[in-house]
Image: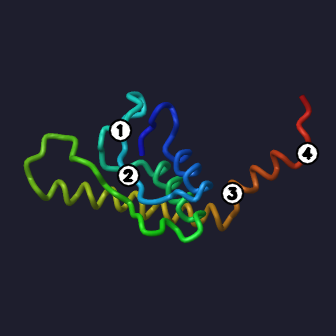
Amino acid sequence: MPRSLGIRSNMRLRVARINGALGSIDANQGDLLLGWDTDEFPTDLYASTLAMYEILQNEGGIGRGGVNFDVKVRRTSFEPIDVVYAHINGMDAFARGLQVAAKLIEDRAFESVIEDRYASPALF
């Protein structure tokens, strides 16, 4: 889940969700220092958790879309099994992200922080 134009992917997912436009997600990851998608398999638990958080918050989940791995193996590899292992790692990242996101929602972790922050007028 890369950064694009300085905007993290979870923010793009949130904007899509809020506007009723959340569909299939391109679950690539890239190098944050580059700022664009390098088509790597997703392994970042934090990014997959935030993506799954938005999907779980979306009424109806992801709808007819899905999690798309439009990716390549990023190392010297000539064995087909390496692609299988890479897919397994990506799916594991999203499976664990789903579990963590469900717990965050159950515990109202983000909502509690936001409610506390805006409970009283800010004094500037």
Position of residue 62 measured from the top left corner of the image (x, y, whole percent): 48, 65
Tell me which numbered mark, 4 or 3, is placed earlier along the sequence: 3
Type of residue at label 4? Ser
Q: Position of residue 29 (x, y in %)?
A: 37, 44
* Contact? badges 2 and 3 (CB < 8 Å): no
44 left or right of 15? left
Q: Which residue is mark 2?
A: 26
First reached walking from the N terminus: tag 4 or tag 2: 2
Q: CA distance from mark 2 to mark 1?
A: 10 Å
Q: Nearer the viewer, residue 39 or 75?
A: 39
Classify mark 4: helix, strand or loop.
Answer: loop
**Of all residues shown, which one is farthest toward the bottom?**
60
Q: Residue at x 42, y 46 (%)?
A: 1
Give the CA distance from mark 2 to mark 3.
26 Å
Give me the disc on residue 37. Answer: 1
**Marking on residue 115:** none
Lower sequence index among marks 2 and 3: 2
Q: Quadrant of the C terminus?
A: top right
In-front residue for pair 35/33: 35
Residue at 68%, 54% (x, y): give it: 110
Location of residue 104 by image quarter: bottom right
Q: Residues within 10 Å of mark 2 (few under 14, many from 20)?
A: some
Q: Secondary structure at mark 1?
A: loop
Percent across and percent down for residue 88 are 28, 61
Q: Which residue position holds label 3?
A: 109
The label nearer to you, 1 versus 4, is 1
Q: Are marks 2 and 1 in contact (CB under 8 Å)?
A: yes
- Residue 120 bears which disc, if any? 4
**Circle 1: residue type:** Asp
Give the colour scheme of this rendering. rainbow
